[in-house]
Amino acid sequence: MKWFVTLLLGAALGVVAAVLWLGRGVPEAGTAAPGPAVTPAPAAAPPAAAPAPAPAAGVPLPSSELPEVVPPAPVSPATTSVDIDVKPAIGPLLLPVAGVSAKELTNTFEQPRGTERRHEALDIPAPKGTPVYATADGKIVKLFNSKPGGITIYQFDPSEKYAYYYAHLDGYAPDLKEGQQVRRGQMIGYVGVTGNSDPNVPHLHFAIFELNADKKWWEGTPVNPYPYLTGQTK
Ligand SMILES: [Zn+2]
């Protein structure tokens, strides 16, 4: 009988061993599954790395915000005040009507014209036929006849940033042509009453505007000529 007990014990041990082995085998298969879970572990590593990029992104953020904050601050105050007041690029201009002195000028730039518009120019009274001079060096870009302006001249400054506009002329100087270079003080036309000018009050309507990027001779931002004609520029 001993041999039978031994056999049973042996079988039992064998079963236990088999179960243990299987049990280990299963867990190992289980760890094999966690094994792939090791792959998610890298995925879990990114989250761990994510916090790193977050601070990393947090560092660039302040530095990128700083330059953004800095430009707006100087840009808006500095340039707008310059825009409103005086353009250093223009400099003093010659009073474009013969025999008129700066003291006689009236700042009519802000005068209302209709309900929505401003004058945005200076009116310089003078007898009809009084010579009109180029206010500065530049180029005659357009000789134009319009209903409001009458006989007009559009001149660009040498940098082609600004345009000078002369309106209500009686006529042009002989041989004045589009594309012609003119010198400061050169006679370019005569005071008149053409366009919507009061026939009883002949005057030169003189305007300056800052050209847009496309430099269309009829478009731009009005600039008050008064300080340039009266020597109030620095
Ligand atoms: Zn006017």
Image: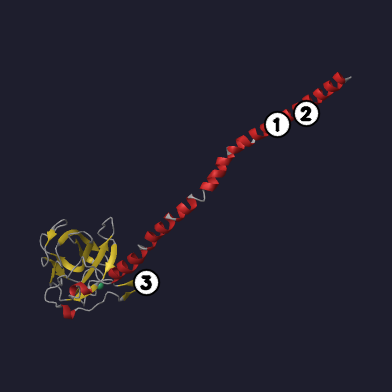
Q: Nearer the viewer, mark 1 or mark 3?
A: 1
Instruction: Please tell me whether mark 1 sits on a helix, a strand or a loop.
Output: helix
Percent coordinates x, y for residue 133 in the rendering: 13, 68
The quadrant where ligand 1 appears is: bottom left
Identify the residue at image location x=87%, y=20%.
Answer: 2
User: Label 2, label 1: how many angstroms apart (C-alpha)?
Assistant: 12 Å
The quadrant the N terminus occupies is top right
N-terminal of the pair, mark 1 or mark 3, is 1
| Labelled disc at residue 52 | none
Q: Which residue is mark 2?
A: 16
| Labelled disc at residue 24 | 1
Q: Nearer the viewer, residue 169 or 213?
A: 213
Q: Nearer the viewer, residue 140 or 79?
A: 79
> Can I make out residue 151 in this image?
no
Quarter assignment of residue 183: bottom left
Quarter assignment of residue 6: top right
Instruction: Please tell me whether mark 3 sits on a helix, a strand or a loop.
Output: loop
Instruction: Please tell me whether mark 2 sits on a helix, a strand or a loop.
Output: helix
Percent coordinates x, y for residue 24 in the rendering: 70, 31
User: In screen coordinates, is 10 left or right of 53?
Assistant: right
The quadrant the C terminus occupies is bottom left
Identified by mark 2, the residue type is Val
Q: Nearer the viewer, residue 149 or 162?
A: 162
| Labelled disc at residue 116 | 3
- The image shows residue 213, relative to residue 26, as above or below, that is below
N-terminal of the pair, mark 3 or mark 2, is 2
Q: Nearer the viewer, mark 3 or mark 2?
A: 2
